[in-house]
């Protein structure tokens, strides 16, 4: 199917990208809370998205601690938009639920 | 991927974006007021010469830095006000309104109008900026809860 990105087949990975698409930058802990995954799972998903150049990660010190901030790249934005459009096209074939 | 799986994926997007709207977009009244104050200082500076304009600009910039730092700490995220999306018209309208009031301040300086006039224009800038900040937050929240599908 055109536009479907295998990288977004993992629901959590798609949700991470969908959240980052709505902000300029989000901190690791906030992302973990919203997606409801463990630290290690989130790290793996972010690493996979980072390898594809969909997500940019940066470390910054705050309150004496190192924090990781994630943002969606332009490539990531485009890939997500294509993926969501493809999902909508697939869903368009679903019958509308009757009242 | 079949339609049921696609539906579930879109619902998953809706769910997390709704969670973001609920947990991380509440903007307290003081935050709107602080933004209005920053904009009012930027506008007011135009009504004076460099000796006053410089310090006012510096205070306004410090205010921006403090607001951004506080947003990041409180919400664990940062959203650029000039982002693409449904909030863009609000941001553009705010910029146009601020430029208009700044033009008024410059006119007040050149024409030697009273301090009350300059403060009045800054007051207008404050009110417009607070209103735009409230509207922006509402539109952003509506965008997040609007759904991907």
Image (cartoon, rainbow, N blue to C red):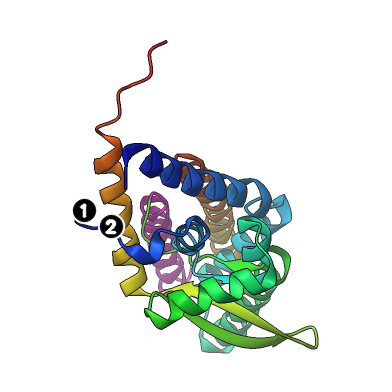
Residue at image point 30% right, 37% down: A91
Which chain's residue wears label 2? A
Looking at the image, is B145 positioned above or below residue A38? above
Q: What is the C-alpha distance between the residues marked 1 and 2?
A: 6 Å
Can residue B67 be seen here? The reply is: no
In the rendered image, residue A4, in percent from the top left (x then y), is placed at: 28, 57
Q: Is residue A48 magenta?
A: no
Q: Quadrant of the C terminus of chain A?
A: top left
**Mark seen at residue A94:** none
The one nearer the camera, A8 or B86, is A8
Name which residue lies at 48% across and 63% down.
A13
Front residue (pair B143, B20): B20
Q: Is residue B79 left or right of residue A86?
A: right
Kindly give the residue lying farthest to the top in the view shown.
Answer: A99
**Near-viewer residue (B146 or B132):** B146
Closer-to-camera residue (B109/B16): B16
Q: Residues within 10 Å of mark 1 (few under 14, many from 20)?
A: few
Q: Which residue is mark 1?
A: A1
User: Residue B89 in the image: x percent, y percent?
Assistant: 36, 51
Inspect this view and state whether residue B76 appears: yes
Q: Which residues are magenta?
A: B86-114
**Chain identifier of the residue bearing label 1 in the image:** A
Residue at coordinates 37% horizontally, 78% vertically from top-left? A52
Circle 2 residues within 10 Å: few <14, some 14–19, many ≥20: some
Which secondary structure, mark 2? loop
Q: Residue at x 60, y 59 (%)?
A: B36
Whether residues under marks 1 and 2 lie with C-beta atoms below 8 angstroms apart, the answer is: yes
Identify whether B8 is placed above or below B79.
Answer: above
In this rendering, position of residue B36 left or right of residue A66: left
Please identify the dominant SS of the magenta region: helix
- The residue tagged 2 is A4
């Amino acid at each position: 199917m055109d536009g479907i990105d295998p990288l977004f087949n993992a629901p959590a990975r798609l949700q991470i990208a969908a959240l980052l698409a709505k902000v300029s930058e989000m901190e690791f802990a906030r992302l973990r809370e919203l997606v409801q995954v463990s630290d290690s799972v989130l790290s793996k998903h972010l690493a996979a998205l980072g390898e594809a150049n969909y997500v940019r990660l940066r470390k910054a010190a705050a309150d004496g601690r190192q924090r990781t901030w994630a943002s969606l790249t332009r490539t990531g934005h485009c890939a997500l938009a294509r993926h969501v459009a493809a999902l909508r096209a697939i869903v368009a074939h679903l019958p509308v639920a009757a009242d | 991927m079949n339609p049921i799986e696609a539906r579930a994926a879109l619902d998953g997007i809706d769910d997390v974006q709704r969670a973001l709207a609920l947990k991380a977009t509440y903007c307290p009244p003081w935050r709107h007021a602080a933004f209005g104050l920053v904009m009012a200082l930027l506008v007011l500076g135009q009504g004076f010469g460099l000796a006053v304009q410089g310090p006012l600009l510096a205070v306004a910039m410090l205010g921006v830095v403090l607001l951004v730092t506080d947003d990041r700490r409180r919400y664990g995220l940062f959203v650029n006000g000039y982002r693409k999306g449904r909030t863009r018209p609000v941001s553009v309208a705010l910029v146009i309104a601020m430029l208009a009031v700044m033009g008024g301040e410059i006119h007040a300086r050149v024409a030697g109008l009273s301090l009350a006039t300059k403060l009045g224009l800054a007051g207008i800038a404050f009110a417009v900026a607070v209103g735009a900040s409230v509207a922006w937050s509402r539109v952003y929240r509506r965008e997040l809860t609007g759904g991907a599908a």
